[in-house]
Image (cartoon, rainbow, N blue to C red):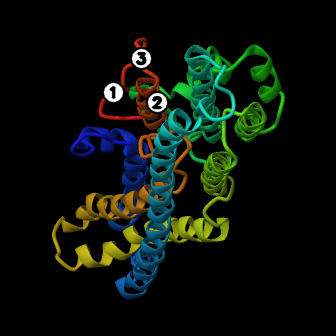
Amino acid sequence: MHAGRRFTLTEVINWTRRDIMFYLVLATIPTLLFELLGWKWLSIPWVPIALVGTAVAFVTGFRNNASYDRLWEARQIYGAIVNSSRAWGIMVLDLVTAKHANPSVTQSDLGKVHTRLIHRHIAWMHALRFQLRQPRAWEHMIKVYNREYMKWYTVDEVENKVEDALTGLITHEEKVLVLGKANAAVHLIMLQSKDLRELLDQGLIEDFRHMELEKMLVDLYAQQGKCERIKNFPYPRQFGTLNLMFTKLFISLVPFGMLGEFAKLGGGFVWLTIPFSALVAWVFNMMEKIGESTENPFEGSANDVPITAITRTIEIDLREMLGEKDIPAALKPQNHILM
């Protein structure tokens, strides 16, 4: 997520510099042929090109709205995870007690139970973020202009391993178990449920309290499933493909339509076809790229939902609930990019 006031012009130009050079070349070739070799037949009436441009604008607008909806839904889901995580923390601390059926349990033993349940939840959040950052074939971070932009920031899930993130939060046996599964986050919640059942049998949780805690685990499963739905189901490829094809078609036609328009002005105005064609092409290309960079909110781009920072924020809150002193610092933006 970009945490600054706006992307700078330098950043935008650097991100699209290859496209700009291509559009300048694309406009220069027909202009040279038209003006120096006298190929006047290269000029195309502007009206049909404008009609294509209108259609492209509508399709691009539809795609960008859909992409924004995916981004905003992802942010809402993680907002719900924040709320549910804090609720889990206070429920564990206040509902898992020993005074009812098992008064022999000491306060120290009870503190260990609280720590185990809350730390395992933190481990679930770390496992989830690593799973959501795993690349998919339809995502765009593989493209060279996106890879280059990543030099301005680092993605923790790319630089580090989930094994390291889970160390110290769960036992070695649990870590081996969950990492051996296809979906580690799912099995961490399963371990939570198993633990709650054992606490019920030990008399540390009443039936009603056990049900409430289990409902919270079901809610966390629901939030994880919503994240996985966005991650594993791309923006429909038929819409994305047609939008890209129509945009490229319009961009390739723009210089031929502008030739006649600037030639009507006489003199050397026909050479203005080159910069203005590149400008129009750049604008439409930017609209296409905005949708492209927004449609996958968990891939690790500068426009992602900052799930790493959100996870750290929740971890800080939960550790403070436990009264711990060794608490990690909140993550800060790197060159205005918060991951």
The three-letter amino acid code for the residue at tag 2 is Leu
Judge depth for marks 1 and 2 and give the one in front.
Answer: 2
Identify whether 159 is placed above or below 239: above
Q: Which residue has dot 2 on it?
A: 318
Residue at the location (37% across, 82% down)? Answer: 50
Q: Residues within 10 Å of mark 2 (few under 14, many from 20)?
A: many
Residue 131 place in picture, x, y as percent: 66, 38
The three-letter amino acid code for the residue at tag 3 is Ile
Left or right, residue 98 beside residue 289: right
- Please state, as top left, top right, bottom left or bottom right, where the C terminus lies in the image: top left
Residue 169 place in picture, x, y as percent: 62, 20
Q: Which residue has dot 1 on it?
A: 332
Q: Which mark is residue 327?
A: 3
Front residue of this view, candidates 8 and 45: 8
Q: CA distance from mark 3 to mark 1?
A: 15 Å
In primary-sequence order, the first of circles 2 and 3 is 2
Q: Could you tell me which secondary element the residue under label 3 belongs to?
A: loop
